[in-house]
Image: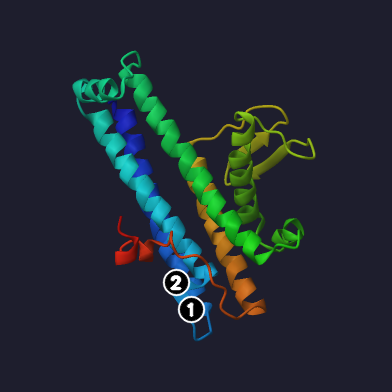
Amino acid sequence: MTTETQRIYRIIEKLLIRLNQTTYDCQGIIYRKCDFSEKKDEDSRVAIMGFIRGEIIATYFQFINLKNAANGSDKNLTDFRQSIGEIDLPNNALLELLKSNIRMNFANNVYSLLESGHRNFFSSGKFKDYKNNFDLTLVNGFEILRHLRNSMHSNGLFFPPDKKDFICVYRGYEINFKNGDFVRYNYKLIYWIIRDSLLLFTEMAIDNLEKTPNFLPILQEYNIEKYFDDKNVL
């Protein structure tokens, strides 16, 4: 592993740890706004941050294993490839495959969780107008994450319903997703769009609590707090 690759791995590890802390902070803000007698950590607006924290923990575990594999001997990677029957796949191609898988699954899963939360609050079809009430940077972060996730339905290509290009300046990045072109990104952009999407969800959850201050239940099966219940042990 080159010195530059080692530096990138260190940065990514720190960014994942920061995102995990962000979910704690956001969940605490939402939790303290809940003013009802039911169990607050089972409210949908609170619990989704627990779901996302579980996703970050799982991604961090995969990332550490990937880093160890990249730092380890080629023999370990070769043994792994042979055990699954991929004898023609070079070790460097295996590492690229694993990196791509972690990166895409992470962004897609986090977006899916946040989208489920937004739809729980705004099922009337007015979400597009509603989100414009919030900070533009946070909204753009969520929009970029949405486009990244939706591109998976078209082999990585950007095909918006209105067929218009998506252009914005976002945290120093010039974002230009052209209709019919590939959606391109890097690990720093993924960090920022997920962070800002979490902050946007938090603001929306607080706003929703002010409008709907009663308990909103959600299936708790994927909440990190429930992973260790006896009934959930395989």
- Is 181 left, or right, of 6 in this rendering? right
**Residue 44 drawn at (x, y percent):** 53, 68
**Residue 202 drawn at (x, y percent):** 55, 65
Is any atom of residue 187 visible in this view? no
Give the colour scheme of this rendering.
rainbow
Viewer-proximal residue, 214 or 159? 214
- Is 151 left, or right, of 27 in this rendering? right
Circle 2 residue: 28
**Residue 204 drawn at (x, y percent):** 62, 66
Q: Is residue 8 above or below residue 212?
A: above
Circle 1 residue: 32
- Is 153 left, or right, of 68 in this rendering? right
Quarter containing the C terminus: bottom left
> Are the residues at dot 1 and dot 2 in contact (C-beta closer than 8 Å)?
yes
Viewer-proximal residue, 10 or 38? 38
Q: Secondary structure at mark 2?
A: helix
What's the residue at 26%, 20% (across, down)? Answer: 82
